[in-house]
Amino acid sequence: MSTTTSIQTPWPDYISSLEPDVSESPVSAVLPQDAVAQHPDPHLAQDKARWSGHWFGWAFSGRLCDVKLVVEKVSLDAATIVYLGATASGTICERIQAHSNANELQGTLTSGTQLSFRMRSDGVVEFISHAEGVVRYGGVLSQGVLPKRDTDRIPTRFVENSKHISLEVVIYKPAGSGPFPTLMFNHGSTGNGNRPAEFKTTWTNPALTKFFTDKGWLVAFPQRRGRGKSDGTYDEGFEVNRATGYSCNPNLSLPGLERALADMDAATDYLSTRPDVDNKRMLIGGVSRGGIASVVYAGTRPTRFTGVINFVGGWVGDDCGTVEAINTVSFKRGAAFAKPMLWLYGENDPFYKIAHSRKNFNAFIAAGGKGVFKVFSPIAGQSGHGLTAMQALWQADLMTYIDQIDLK
């Protein structure tokens, strides 16, 4: 059993934008049977007593670590905690004595790695692992009930190397059997496309999931070919030398968009067959490449969805000299969609300056499109490209949009 002393916690800015969710770890963290939370002393101050209990959540990029925490015994200045983290490569399970420092619990594992936990006003617990002032990983924990999550396979018509391709789709549902109004939300790219290890991370979004499932919606996150656990090759517009990443050449880039649209066809076909999906109340949306792909999809298949939500959409970064021949031309294809769309963008976006995104929207409107363009200012130091995680900024506009297209 390790002890700890008070340390200065190097909290990174991004921690405050993380949201509770189930982990993506293939290994579940199983707590020992003797990990039991004791009732706190009735005279203990509430800000200390509320730490008592069981917490669960995730850590690591891609939520690849399943985390559980039991605060077994808490006092004015200390707590006994059981920390458990499980990944595909191994499990850590330790009982440690933690020090209470303001609204934090701080402890040290036998390896010397320091753990810091702090509680938000809504009861969500943020935590980081750090050593000598360097953060190793972060995550969030919750005592709340998360939406029901299922992972399914989408059959497709695609064949690669004589193998039939299926796609992964992650589905979150509220309580009940439905049919539910449904949001199909499409992931973006992986930065510049030159980090292939990131292709295999299954992408979902806790903030959007909570927003919609709290309102009785089903939310589906399909993973396109070669992404997450989907079969096939990820081939959405790379240079001839794939190691250099995505291409700015329209002849190489735009066929990647068509490939994405074909995958979205498969996902839409699949969702429309599910008995828990209300086919008359379906939205399509996405972030970054998923945002522009959703706009284009709605314009080229105008009867399949009732509305479109575009978060920080674009296919290539605005540093490409050919950006208008790719992004602007593609966005104009969405103008054939008869109903209004909602375009949401954030300042301080390293991929898409607001001036470029507004030019795309104006071209979309000039081509006959309908919609609203909103710009938000993230917290100082945060990238506007991470807007989907900043629910407080966009939730009012998103609720207004849903009401206006009569999807209540």
Image (cartoon, helix red, strand yellow):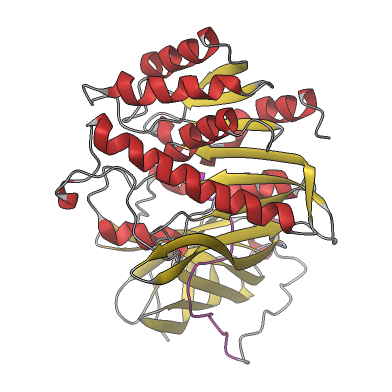
Q: Residue at x 46, y 30 (%)?
A: 312
> In the current view of this chain or complex, which residue is farthest to the bottom?
33
User: Looking at the image, is 7 positioned above or below residue 69?
Assistant: above
Of 214 and 319, which appears nearest the observer?
319
Q: Residue at x 66, y 25 (%)?
A: 397
Secondary structure mainly formed by the magenta segment:
loop
Of 60 and 155, which appears nearest the observer?
155
User: Looking at the image, is 330 positioned above or below residue 373?
Assistant: below
Instruction: Judge whether residue 156 is colored magenta.
Output: no
In the rendered image, residue 259, in percent from the top left (x then y), is placed at 41, 46
Q: Residue at x 37, y 17 (%)?
A: 356
Q: Residue at x 80, y 50 (%)?
A: 180
Q: Is residue 360 visible?
A: yes
> In the current view of this chain or complex, which residue is farthest to the top?
366
Of 295 and 372, which appears nearest the observer?
295
Of 210 and 135, which appears nearest the observer?
210
Q: Quadrant of the C terminus?
A: top right
Instruction: Judge whether residue 23 is colored magenta.
Output: yes
Q: Is residue 107 visible?
A: no
Left or right: residue 142 versus residue 145 is: left
Span shown in magenta: 17-32
When asked about the image quadrant of residue 131, the answer is bottom left
In the rendered image, residue 267, in percent from the top left (x then y), is placed at 58, 53
Left or right: residue 304 versus residue 319 is: right
In the rendered image, residue 256, in percent from the top left (x then y), is placed at 35, 42
Left or right: residue 58 versus residue 232 is: right
In the rendered image, residue 303, in percent from the top left (x then y), is placed at 69, 33
- Count up the numbered dots: 0
When asked about the image quadrant of residue 406, the answer is top right
Q: Quadrant of the N terminus?
A: bottom left
